[in-house]
Image (cartoon, rainbow, N blue to C red):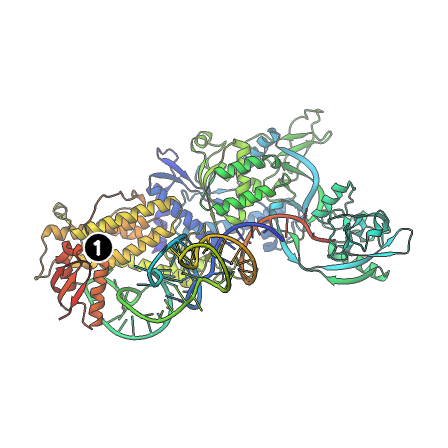
RNA sequence: GGGCCGGUGGUCUAGCGGCUAUGACAUUACCCUUACAAGGUAAGAAUCGGCGGUUCGAAUCCGCCUCGGCCCACCA
């Protein structure tokens, strides 16, 4: 049944974004998911919550721009394709690699879109295309053209430069990666105690190292200035084992006395410490690691071997010469790992293009302060990250399926020429027609590199708002209202978007940032493929329905504050709340008023009470939803339906609504008021919960009120007041029910005399009818019951 | 190593200076009540992670410890 409703929504073009609207626009910069694999439970939950936001804003008079983006560039796509089709992109042609990527994307795109559909999400368009609000793909010609255009602008602003720096090198993928793409893992290694000789002496020095294969790049040996064991070596020369190279020995505080042998060799490009040390000491480093992770001619006999093989080999060599004294396991230490390929990062020199970011750190802090974060913790994570930025952003990658760097170089003088803005170009296979401005030569070669995937995705808010494509619309509707995204990509997507879009437009590109936490497994652990604890959302949608899942997303908590533990039991139980809404609606639907009857209404005190209570729910929900809190208002509304509306109000007015008890007769106007109030309160409460419980409320509302709930305005405020004290009413009813139970009599049986709180006097008649009370008095605040 | 968040009945959670500490799920008992047994009514179940301090009064504030989770950092 749900699916049919989703289908109706999909086909109803009135839900589509209307760019000619006079309404204010609320724009949501949805995070384009990678569609290299089916969407996971986290996607399902977070997009569902975005759907709550979109539906709520629609009801509040906004034209909502809520497009779906699909991230189809970059390493994750390539890695998935390599795995799926069992190919190695470094061993096949670029054309072939791209074909495999396209093949993968063709197979997965439709499935991902369908998964969002099955969550009951209504994006502001279901069509792929170039128009504002269409489903967009980051590998489309128009998106890639915009990515290239932003590069050209940044180049022309002088913010991009090429430099030959030590980069984080992923030997498996054979590309540079950014600092933000590195994770640290505790990996165990070994200390190899190897023998250095002191020059012009017979003395041997044992030095512990974890990277014996780098002995050939050793430029210095250091020990701690306070270390008595080595003090005599200060200023002496040591001879490296096997390679027999002379290196100086010095005291330096960065050597710790109690670590390893307390004396260490400094190698060029072993890790970042070494690199900094070399720079600080004015040493000239020797590069030994090739692009593919093998060692080069500087490594002598180790040439051509990859790191692991080289380590094995040098260990054998040293052992055979008696230069290796001991191998001891190290404590697990933090090793830099490429997030995308899981390979250990090496540090080598490569020419790459950089976008300046270090000089904008202060500006970025200011921008961060101006964005409205729903959770201050997320803001702190961003500020912390900004503090750690120490080098400019390397934006080029040496891979295949991504946006190409739109630059050619003159064959003769190497002068770069840029593509024309607005066109999508592929310099690696396209020729450049023109002459070199510098030397007038007419032949060029294209840049083979592509952009970091964040260079693409960091323009999503520009793209969805029509930057350069629909410039007028863009200017009118920037900044984007909301950036919803995960906390794990604060240092990438959030940071790069704020940075890049500021550099391009000098604007802070969005107003609000809703940074969500994670859906974790039942025990509280992060879900991951390797752990095997991932949950497929399709299974949940089929077993428990999208409605149960949606209401769970709201009832479970606020995802921007806490992780959600994914428990099937809790999803199922969350769905039980739906039963109450369904049943109470079924009851109310038994009553209707004719036009004539609608004119004859006399609201009684209890009607005014429930109307004023419902108004509180409406106002609280509006305030909460406006602040992206879907948890508290939803829980309040559900409690209201169950505890106040269904259990008390409905029970009280039942007799009045039926009005068929010969002993207690209500006037027509009073009877009509009961029916009208039942319907009005139900209407309001369905409207309040419509963003969350979208499908069921849509169905019920159509049955009862013949209208599309999602096209209704948010319920108006009413100013009804009441003399009734709600808590006393609830307590009174509860006391009667309890007394009847304790005396073992049926709820229908009569009570001889009841003393009720004074405040309930206005509804005397109804209370008598409801509980079958023969005589009722109103004194003070206490309830007293005489059974017989 | 630095930082952030959290530890409340079996499970999850509210409270964040003041009456006998919310609520949900689960458990148990009873109940067909003119919408609802996928329901209702009720019961049992927590010395609020530990220790110390501030206070007339602490789950709530402070300090230390401990256990989880997350983020960051150049250590051989």
Badge 1: few (under 14), some or many (20 or more) residues near its Cα, within 10 Å?
A: some
Where residue A413 sits: x, y (%)? 73, 29
Where residue A173 sits: x, y (%)? 66, 49
Q: Quadrant of the rendered structure where residue A263 is?
A: bottom right
Q: Residue, x 13% and y 53% (percent of image)?
A: A671
Q: Nearer the viewer, residue A674 or A7?
A: A674
**Placement of A687 over or under A501, stated as above or below:** below
**Dot 1: element:** loop
**Placement of A786 over or under A237, stated as above or below:** below
Quarter of the image for the N terminus of chain A: give it: bottom left
Task: Please state the total of marks drawn on the protein image.
Answer: 1
Quarter of the image for the C terminus of chain A: give it: bottom left
**Placement of A23 over or under A696, stated as above or below:** above
Q: Nearer the viewer, residue A81 or A696?
A: A696
Q: Nearer the viewer, residue B26 or A305?
A: B26
Where residue A140 sits: x, y (%)? 53, 40
Lateral position of residue A234 relative to residue A369, left or right: right
Is residue A155 something that shows in the picture? yes
Q: Residue, x 33% and y 59% (percent of image)?
A: A577
**Placement of A545 over or under A91, stated as above or below:** below
Is residue A100 something that shows in the picture? no
Lateral position of residue A786 relative to residue A616, left or right: left
Where residue A129 sits: x, y (%)? 46, 40
Lateral position of residue A88 relative to residue A472, left or right: right
Subunit of mark 1? A
Q: Which residue is mark 1?
A: A589
């Amino acid at each position: 049944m749900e699916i049919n409703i989703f289908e109706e929504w999909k086909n109803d073009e009135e839900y589509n974004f209307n760019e000619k609207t006079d309404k204010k626009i609320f724009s949501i910069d949805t995070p384009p998911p990678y569609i290299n694999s089916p969407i996971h439970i986290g996607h399902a939950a977070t997009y569902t919550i975005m759907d709550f936001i979109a539906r709520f804003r629609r009801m509040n008079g906004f034209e909502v721009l809520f497009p779906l983006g699909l991230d189809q560039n970059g390493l994750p796509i390539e890695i998935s394709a390599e795995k799926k089709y069992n190919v190695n992109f470094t061993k096949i042609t670029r054309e072939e690699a791209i074909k495999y990527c396209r093949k993968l994307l063709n197979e997965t795109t439709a499935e991902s879109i369908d998964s969002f559909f099955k969550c009951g999400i209504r994006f502001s368009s279901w069509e792929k295309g170039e128009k504002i609000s269409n489903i967009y793909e980051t590998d489309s010609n128009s998106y890639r053209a915009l990515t290239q255009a932003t590069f050209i602008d940044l180049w022309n602003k002088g913010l991009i430069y090429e430099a030959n720096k030590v980069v984080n090198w992923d030997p498996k993928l054979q590309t540079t990666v950014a600092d933000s793409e590195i994770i640290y893992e505790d990996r165990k290694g070994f200390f190899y105690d190897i023998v250095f000789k002191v020059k012009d002496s017979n003395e041997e020095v044992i030095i512990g190292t974890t990277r014996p294969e780098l002995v050939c790049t050793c430029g210095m040996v250091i020990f701690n200035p306070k270390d008595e064991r080595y003090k005599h070596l200060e200023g002496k020369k040591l001879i490296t084992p096997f390679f027999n190279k002379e290196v100086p020995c010095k005291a330096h505080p960065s050597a710790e006395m109690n670590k390893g042998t307390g004396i260490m060799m400094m190698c060029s490009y072993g890790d970042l410490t070494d690199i900094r040390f070399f720079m600080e000491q004015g040493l000239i480093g020797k590069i030994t690691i090739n692009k593919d992770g093998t060692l080069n001619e500087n490594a002598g006999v180790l040439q051509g071997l990859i790191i692991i093989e080289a380590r094995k080999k040098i260990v054998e060599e040293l052992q055979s010469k008696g230069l290796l004294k001991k191998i001891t396991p190290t404590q697990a230490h933090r090793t830099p790992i490429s997030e995308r390929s899981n390979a250990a990062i090496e540090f080598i020199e490569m020419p790459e293009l950089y976008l300046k970011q270090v000089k904008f750190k202060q500006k970025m802090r200011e921008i961060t302060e101006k964005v409205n974060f729903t959770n201050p913790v997320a803001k702190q994570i961003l500020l912390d990250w900004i503090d750690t930025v120490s080098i400019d952003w390397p934006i080029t990658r040496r891979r295949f399926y991504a946006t190409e760097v739109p630059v050619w170089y003159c064959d003769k003088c190497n002068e770069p020429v840029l593509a024309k803005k607005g066109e999508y170009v592929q310099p690696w296979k396209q020729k450049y027609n023109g002459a070199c401005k510098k030397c007038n030569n007419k032949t060029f070669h294209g840049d083979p590199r592509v952009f970091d995937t964040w260079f693409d995705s960091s323009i999503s808010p520009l793209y969805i708002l029509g930057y350069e494509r629909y410039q007028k619309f863009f200017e009118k509707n920037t900044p984007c209202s909301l950036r919803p995204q995960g906390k794990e990509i604060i240092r990438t997507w959030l940071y790069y978007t704020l940075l890049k879009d500021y550099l391009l437009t000098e604007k802070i590109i969005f107003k609000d940032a809703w940074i969500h936490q994670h859906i974790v497994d039942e025990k509280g652990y992060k879900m991951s493929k390797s752990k095997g604890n991932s949950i497929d959302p399709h299974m949940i949608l089929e077993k428990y329905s999208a409605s149960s899942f949606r209401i769970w997303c709201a009832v479970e908590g606020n995802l921007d504050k806490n992780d959600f533990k994914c428990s099937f039991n809790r999803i199922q139980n969350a769905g039980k709340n739906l039963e109450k809404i369904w049943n109470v609606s079924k009851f109310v639907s038994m009553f209707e008023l004719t036009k004539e009857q609608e004119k004859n209404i006399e609201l009684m005190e209890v009607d005014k009470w429930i109307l004023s209570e419902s108004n509180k729910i409406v106002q609280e929900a509006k305030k909460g939803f406006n602040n992206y809190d879907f948890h508290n208002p939803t829980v309040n509304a559900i409690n209201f339906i169950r505890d106040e509306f269904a259990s008390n109000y409905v029970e009280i007015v039942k007799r009045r609504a039926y009005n068929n008890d010969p002993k207690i007769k209500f006037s027509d106007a009073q009877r009509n008021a009961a029916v009208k109030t039942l319907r009005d309160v139900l209407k309001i409460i369905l409207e309040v919960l419509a963003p969350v419980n979208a499908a069921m409320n849509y169905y019920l509302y159509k049955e009862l009120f013949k209208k599309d709930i999602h096209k209704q305005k948010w319920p108006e405020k009413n100013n009804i007041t009441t003399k009734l004290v709600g808590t006393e009413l609830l307590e009174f009813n509860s006391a009667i029910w309890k007394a009847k139970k304790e005396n073992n009599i049926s709820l229908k049986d009569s009570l001889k005399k009841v003393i009720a709180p004074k405040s309930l006097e206005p509804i005397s008649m109804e209370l008598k009818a409801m509980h079958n009370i023969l005589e009722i008095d109103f004194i003070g605040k206490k309830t007293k019951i005489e059974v017989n």
